Image: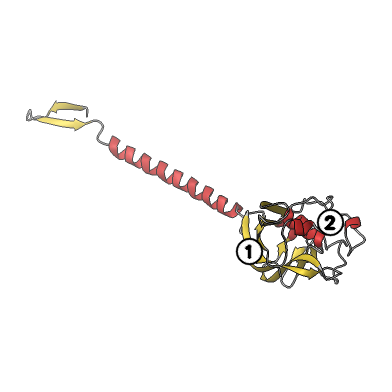
Amino acid sequence: MKKRIEKNNNQKDISYNDFAVSPVIGVMLMLVVTIIIASFVAVFAGSAADSTTSAPSASLDVSIISNGGDTKDQYVMLIKHLGGDSIPSNDIQIMSYYTSPSTCTNGKEMLSGSITQGTPAISASKLSYSDQDVKIPYLNNLAVGSPGDSGTNFGEYTFSAGDVLSTGDDFGTAVAIFGITTTSDIDDNEFLEYGFCRGSSVEVNIIYTPSQTSIYKGMVTVV
Protein backbone atom coordinates (compact mmCIF):
# COMPACT_ATOMS: atom_id res chain seq x y z
CA MET A 1 0.00 0.00 0.00
CA LYS A 2 1.51 3.32 -1.08
CA LYS A 3 1.70 6.05 1.51
CA ARG A 4 3.11 9.53 1.65
CA ILE A 5 4.38 11.16 4.76
CA GLU A 6 4.14 14.88 5.55
CA LYS A 7 5.05 17.02 8.47
CA ASN A 8 2.47 19.05 10.31
CA ASN A 9 3.19 22.23 12.15
CA ASN A 10 4.35 20.25 15.15
CA GLN A 11 6.69 18.30 12.93
CA LYS A 12 4.84 15.05 13.59
CA ASP A 13 4.58 12.49 10.86
CA ILE A 14 1.14 12.09 9.39
CA SER A 15 0.43 9.23 6.98
CA TYR A 16 -2.05 9.59 4.16
CA ASN A 17 -3.31 6.48 2.33
CA ASP A 18 -3.67 7.51 -1.32
CA PHE A 19 -5.66 4.40 -2.14
CA ALA A 20 -7.66 3.76 1.00
CA VAL A 21 -10.88 3.92 -1.00
CA SER A 22 -9.74 1.36 -3.61
CA PRO A 23 -10.80 -1.82 -1.72
CA VAL A 24 -14.30 -0.40 -1.17
CA ILE A 25 -14.70 0.38 -4.86
CA GLY A 26 -13.44 -3.11 -5.75
CA VAL A 27 -15.98 -4.78 -3.48
CA MET A 28 -18.79 -2.66 -4.90
CA LEU A 29 -17.80 -3.57 -8.47
CA MET A 30 -17.70 -7.25 -7.58
CA LEU A 31 -21.20 -7.00 -6.07
CA VAL A 32 -22.55 -5.28 -9.19
CA VAL A 33 -21.02 -7.93 -11.48
CA THR A 34 -22.38 -10.72 -9.28
CA ILE A 35 -25.88 -9.22 -9.38
CA ILE A 36 -25.76 -8.88 -13.17
CA ILE A 37 -24.60 -12.48 -13.60
CA ALA A 38 -27.27 -13.76 -11.19
CA SER A 39 -29.96 -11.85 -13.08
CA PHE A 40 -28.78 -13.28 -16.40
CA VAL A 41 -28.79 -16.83 -15.04
CA ALA A 42 -32.29 -16.35 -13.59
CA VAL A 43 -33.66 -15.06 -16.91
CA PHE A 44 -32.01 -17.89 -18.85
CA ALA A 45 -33.29 -20.53 -16.45
CA GLY A 46 -36.79 -19.09 -16.63
CA SER A 47 -36.74 -19.11 -20.42
CA ALA A 48 -35.49 -22.70 -20.48
CA ALA A 49 -38.22 -23.78 -18.10
CA ASP A 50 -40.90 -22.05 -20.19
CA SER A 51 -39.66 -23.76 -23.36
CA THR A 52 -39.79 -27.25 -21.85
CA THR A 53 -42.94 -29.12 -22.86
CA SER A 54 -44.44 -31.05 -20.00
CA ALA A 55 -46.01 -34.45 -20.63
CA PRO A 56 -49.80 -34.75 -20.46
CA SER A 57 -51.35 -36.52 -17.50
CA ALA A 58 -53.56 -39.33 -18.74
CA SER A 59 -54.59 -42.81 -17.64
CA LEU A 60 -54.12 -45.34 -20.47
CA ASP A 61 -54.76 -49.05 -20.72
CA VAL A 62 -53.35 -51.45 -23.31
CA SER A 63 -54.63 -54.92 -24.08
CA ILE A 64 -53.96 -57.52 -26.78
CA ILE A 65 -56.80 -59.86 -27.58
CA SER A 66 -56.77 -63.06 -29.64
CA ASN A 67 -60.44 -63.02 -30.60
CA GLY A 68 -60.70 -59.65 -32.34
CA GLY A 69 -61.28 -58.48 -35.88
CA ASP A 70 -64.25 -59.19 -38.13
CA THR A 71 -63.72 -62.94 -37.88
CA LYS A 72 -63.22 -62.91 -34.10
CA ASP A 73 -59.98 -64.88 -34.41
CA GLN A 74 -57.51 -62.03 -35.02
CA TYR A 75 -54.81 -60.62 -32.73
CA VAL A 76 -55.70 -56.99 -32.03
CA MET A 77 -54.00 -54.41 -29.83
CA LEU A 78 -56.40 -52.01 -28.14
CA ILE A 79 -55.34 -48.77 -26.44
CA LYS A 80 -57.94 -47.11 -24.22
CA HIS A 81 -57.92 -43.57 -22.83
CA LEU A 82 -59.47 -43.91 -19.36
CA GLY A 83 -59.26 -40.23 -18.38
CA GLY A 84 -57.06 -37.18 -18.10
CA ASP A 85 -55.53 -34.87 -20.68
CA SER A 86 -56.26 -35.18 -24.38
CA ILE A 87 -53.22 -35.99 -26.52
CA PRO A 88 -52.71 -35.22 -30.24
CA SER A 89 -51.94 -38.57 -31.85
CA ASN A 90 -49.19 -36.99 -33.94
CA ASP A 91 -47.34 -36.45 -30.64
CA ILE A 92 -47.43 -40.16 -29.76
CA GLN A 93 -44.97 -42.98 -30.45
CA ILE A 94 -45.94 -46.56 -29.63
CA MET A 95 -43.05 -48.94 -28.94
CA SER A 96 -43.56 -52.71 -28.53
CA TYR A 97 -41.04 -55.40 -27.55
CA TYR A 98 -41.57 -59.15 -27.78
CA THR A 99 -39.11 -62.01 -27.22
CA SER A 100 -40.04 -65.24 -28.94
CA PRO A 101 -39.44 -68.49 -27.00
CA SER A 102 -36.46 -70.65 -27.90
CA THR A 103 -38.81 -73.53 -28.76
CA CYS A 104 -40.57 -71.75 -31.62
CA THR A 105 -39.76 -72.20 -35.31
CA ASN A 106 -37.50 -69.14 -35.52
CA GLY A 107 -35.88 -69.72 -32.12
CA LYS A 108 -35.46 -67.08 -29.43
CA GLU A 109 -35.51 -63.64 -30.99
CA MET A 110 -36.09 -60.09 -29.83
CA LEU A 111 -38.68 -58.36 -31.99
CA SER A 112 -39.79 -54.76 -31.76
CA GLY A 113 -42.20 -52.43 -33.48
CA SER A 114 -42.53 -48.66 -33.55
CA ILE A 115 -45.58 -46.70 -34.65
CA THR A 116 -45.30 -42.96 -35.26
CA GLN A 117 -47.10 -40.37 -37.33
CA GLY A 118 -44.59 -41.14 -40.08
CA THR A 119 -45.41 -44.86 -40.25
CA PRO A 120 -46.97 -45.51 -43.68
CA ALA A 121 -50.59 -46.55 -43.98
CA ILE A 122 -51.46 -50.20 -44.53
CA SER A 123 -52.82 -50.84 -47.99
CA ALA A 124 -56.49 -51.70 -48.21
CA SER A 125 -55.52 -54.81 -50.17
CA LYS A 126 -54.05 -56.28 -46.97
CA LEU A 127 -57.05 -55.47 -44.78
CA SER A 128 -60.22 -57.43 -44.20
CA TYR A 129 -62.12 -54.63 -42.45
CA SER A 130 -61.66 -51.64 -44.75
CA ASP A 131 -61.66 -50.86 -48.45
CA GLN A 132 -59.23 -47.96 -48.00
CA ASP A 133 -55.71 -47.50 -46.65
CA VAL A 134 -55.49 -47.24 -42.86
CA LYS A 135 -52.85 -45.78 -40.54
CA ILE A 136 -52.84 -47.79 -37.33
CA PRO A 137 -53.80 -47.63 -34.60
CA TYR A 138 -56.95 -46.09 -35.98
CA LEU A 139 -59.61 -44.36 -33.90
CA ASN A 140 -62.35 -46.92 -33.33
CA ASN A 141 -65.29 -44.54 -33.36
CA LEU A 142 -68.00 -44.87 -36.00
CA ALA A 143 -69.31 -41.42 -35.07
CA VAL A 144 -66.09 -40.05 -36.58
CA GLY A 145 -65.93 -42.52 -39.44
CA SER A 146 -64.96 -46.00 -40.55
CA PRO A 147 -61.30 -47.09 -40.42
CA GLY A 148 -59.38 -45.12 -43.01
CA ASP A 149 -61.84 -42.22 -43.14
CA SER A 150 -60.44 -38.74 -42.51
CA GLY A 151 -60.05 -38.18 -38.79
CA THR A 152 -59.63 -41.87 -37.89
CA ASN A 153 -56.06 -42.42 -39.08
CA PHE A 154 -53.20 -42.26 -36.61
CA GLY A 155 -51.81 -38.74 -36.59
CA GLU A 156 -55.12 -37.14 -37.56
CA TYR A 157 -57.12 -37.35 -34.33
CA THR A 158 -56.74 -36.20 -30.74
CA PHE A 159 -56.72 -39.09 -28.28
CA SER A 160 -59.25 -38.16 -25.58
CA ALA A 161 -60.98 -39.74 -22.59
CA GLY A 162 -63.25 -42.58 -23.69
CA ASP A 163 -61.45 -43.17 -27.00
CA VAL A 164 -60.27 -46.61 -28.09
CA LEU A 165 -57.48 -47.17 -30.63
CA SER A 166 -57.14 -50.42 -32.56
CA THR A 167 -54.61 -52.21 -34.76
CA GLY A 168 -57.57 -53.86 -36.50
CA ASP A 169 -56.39 -57.38 -37.26
CA ASP A 170 -53.42 -59.75 -37.42
CA PHE A 171 -51.61 -57.65 -40.00
CA GLY A 172 -51.83 -54.40 -38.07
CA THR A 173 -50.77 -56.14 -34.86
CA ALA A 174 -47.80 -57.74 -36.63
CA VAL A 175 -46.71 -54.28 -37.81
CA ALA A 176 -47.04 -52.91 -34.27
CA ILE A 177 -45.32 -55.78 -32.42
CA PHE A 178 -43.01 -57.61 -34.83
CA GLY A 179 -41.84 -54.49 -36.65
CA ILE A 180 -42.70 -55.76 -40.12
CA THR A 181 -43.28 -53.09 -42.74
CA THR A 182 -46.74 -52.07 -43.82
CA THR A 183 -46.03 -53.53 -47.27
CA SER A 184 -44.84 -56.94 -46.03
CA ASP A 185 -46.76 -60.15 -46.43
CA ILE A 186 -47.76 -62.34 -43.51
CA ASP A 187 -49.40 -65.74 -43.57
CA ASP A 188 -51.61 -67.62 -41.18
CA ASN A 189 -48.55 -69.16 -39.48
CA GLU A 190 -46.75 -65.85 -38.84
CA PHE A 191 -47.70 -65.70 -35.18
CA LEU A 192 -47.07 -69.43 -34.64
CA GLU A 193 -43.57 -69.09 -36.10
CA TYR A 194 -42.80 -66.49 -33.44
CA GLY A 195 -44.45 -68.53 -30.70
CA PHE A 196 -47.02 -65.77 -30.25
CA CYS A 197 -50.24 -66.93 -28.65
CA ARG A 198 -52.54 -66.44 -25.68
CA GLY A 199 -50.36 -65.99 -22.60
CA SER A 200 -47.50 -64.32 -24.52
CA SER A 201 -46.15 -61.11 -23.00
CA VAL A 202 -45.43 -57.88 -24.85
CA GLU A 203 -43.79 -54.82 -23.34
CA VAL A 204 -45.53 -51.67 -24.54
CA ASN A 205 -44.12 -48.18 -24.09
CA ILE A 206 -46.14 -45.15 -25.24
CA ILE A 207 -44.07 -41.99 -25.52
CA TYR A 208 -45.12 -38.35 -25.68
CA THR A 209 -42.62 -37.24 -28.30
CA PRO A 210 -42.40 -33.44 -27.62
CA SER A 211 -40.81 -34.19 -24.23
CA GLN A 212 -39.72 -37.80 -24.94
CA THR A 213 -41.62 -38.82 -21.80
CA SER A 214 -43.23 -42.21 -21.28
CA ILE A 215 -46.96 -41.84 -20.58
CA TYR A 216 -47.58 -45.59 -20.44
CA LYS A 217 -45.23 -48.51 -19.88
CA GLY A 218 -46.14 -52.03 -18.95
CA MET A 219 -46.14 -55.73 -19.75
CA VAL A 220 -49.26 -56.79 -21.62
CA THR A 221 -50.38 -60.42 -21.65
CA VAL A 222 -52.26 -61.70 -24.69
CA VAL A 223 -55.76 -62.89 -23.75
Give the secondary structure at mark 2: loop
Q: Earlier in the sequence, mark 1 or mark 2?
A: 2
1 vs 2, front mark: 2
| Element at label 1 | strand
- Marks 1 and 2 in Cβ contact (< 8 Å): no
- Classify the position of the C terminus by image quarter: bottom right
Q: Which residue is found at the position 62% from the left and 66% from the top?
A: 57
Q: Position of residue 188 (x, y in %)?
A: 83, 59
Q: Residue at x 37, y 44 (%)?
A: 31
> Residue, x 41% and y 41% (percent of image)?
33
Q: Is residue 136 visible?
A: no
Quadrant housing residue 189: bottom right
Instruction: Give the distance between the C-alpha atoms of the residues marked 1 and 2, in whole angstroms.
Output: 26 Å
Q: Position of residue 71 (x, y in %)?
A: 86, 69
On residue 219, the disc is 1
**Which amino acid, mark 2?**
Asp
Location of the N terminus (image quadrant): top left
For badge 1, the amino acid type reads: Met
Near-viewer residue (115 or 37): 115
Rendered view: 35 above or below 170: above
Which label sits on residue 187? 2
- Crowding around mark 1 (Cα neighbors within 10 Å: few <14, some 14 to 19, many 20+) is some
Residue at point 88% right, 57% down? 126
* Residue 4 location, quadrant: top left
Whole-percent x, y for residue 14 in the image: 13, 31
- Above or below 196: residue 141: below
Q: How many marks?
A: 2
